[in-house]
Image (spheres, rainbow, N blue to C red):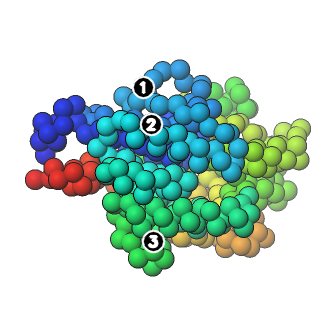
Amino acid sequence: MNCLRISVAYEGGMRIAIVGTKGIPAKWGGMEKYVEEIGSRLVQKGHQVTVFGSRWYCRDYKGDYYRGVRIRRMPTIHLQAVDALTNALMATICIMFCSYDIVHFHGYASYYFIPLLKKLGRTTVLTAHGVESGWNNPKYGAFARRIIIGAFKTGVCRADRVTTVADHLRKKIAVGFGVDAEVCYSGITQESVQPPRLIRKKYGLCGNDYLLFLGRIDPIKRVEWVLDSKDILLSNLKIVIAGGAQDEVSTAYLFNLQQKYCGDSRIVFTGPVTGDEKSELLSNCLMFVSASQDEGLPITLLEACSFSRAAVVTDIEAHREVITDGLNGFLFPKDDKERFLNGLKHTSDMPRQSLERIGMTAKKTVGTRFNWDHTADSYESLYADLLGLQD
């Protein structure tokens, strides 16, 4: 597509509002990482991008712009049932009185406001980061699930264009809602392997002496499965749990795990990690581990593969989109905890050379298929098509 033509048609580029995310910089959560990486690349292409985030999530960063993306901090009620909804409501009110060419929705609760903005003549795009994983979460009751499903149906059926982050999600949207979605994959940022400097000093990690869970702490991730492997693993292996909780239910879940393993020298809870610390953890883990019961397409798995780490994960559609069992990682039944733990024990005992070979294959797998620049190009083209700016 012709980026110059867009810049001429819209002084300063297209004006894009992003709604339904907790905000940037991304501290945890694949959706926030996705928004940050795509938004910053669209800015580099000459467009104006504004992210409407929750004030509580963005409070640690004081600037009004991050990587060129404008941050609008919305007041919200920081409770699980209403945080995302109040974020989207406040963002929608702001957008009603501002001039944006595209309003791009991400989180489920925000989808409820798509029909309103369409009535006001706004062009809307929806990205589904999951389907069933959005509501089949142990932390939600029956009422909450009905609300989320209602929001999802409203959004995908009313948005001007629907995208998603994985092919298995595209198929589910087509079958379940009769909507053709475009796949815009998550990406990876190729980084060099880092020696264990920070993590040696902070956590006593020397390299290849720990298993790593990295991601949002949430009951659907079943972090307790990973921790329960401690009793069957070699005694010199530690288990590192890196990530933060985003709501009161997940916070209570994390607290209970921390209390259970308090004082155990083999268990390390790092909290949210970014930058060099995150890179070092990914560079030096023996294996990346996920026992999740459902996912959209986990960016942390892609990142682990990009660092040539072998992954041991549950056999769910999202993981199968990246991992071929025995070739570039390992898949174990998603609802059989004993087989998962025994599989984790077996793989952790494998020769290091075998794990390294599998890790190198994993890096090749994700190296070309998952690319932030390609995804940003796809969104730029999609927006331009909606606005009638394509050549």
**Residue 372 vs residue 235, the one in the foreground:** 372
Residue depicted at x 43% and y 64%: 156
Q: Secondary structure at mark 1?
A: strand
For mark 2, give the secondary structure.
helix
Against 107, residue 145 (above or below) is below
> Marks 3 and 2: CB-CB under 8 Å?
no
Which residue is at a point 73% across and 32% down the rendered structure image?
203
Q: Which mark is residue 65?
A: 1
Q: Nearer the viewer, residue 150 or 306?
A: 150
Amino acid type indicated by mark 1: Tyr
Measure the C-alpha gap from mark 3 to mark 2: 30 Å
Point out the frontmost of discs 1 and 2: 2
Q: Secondary structure at mark 3?
A: helix
- The residue under the point 28% across, 43% down is 101
- What percent of the width, then of the height, locates residue 129? 49, 57
Q: Amino acid at mark 2?
A: Cys
Cα separation, mark 1 vs mark 2, equals 18 Å
Residue tagged by mark 3?
Answer: 173
Callout 2: few (<14), some (14-19), or many (20+) C-alpha neighbours within 10 Å?
some
Near-viewer residue (126 or 336): 126
Residue tagged by mark 2? 94
The picture places residue 362, in percent across and down from the top left corner, at 47, 57
- Graded by Cα atoms within 10 Å as few (under 14), some (14 to 19) or many (20 or more), the crowding at tag 3 reads many
Residue 126 shown left or right of residue 222 in the figure? left
Q: Which of the two discs, 3 and 2, sits closer to the camera?
A: 2
Q: Judge left or right: residue 378 versus residue 244.
A: left
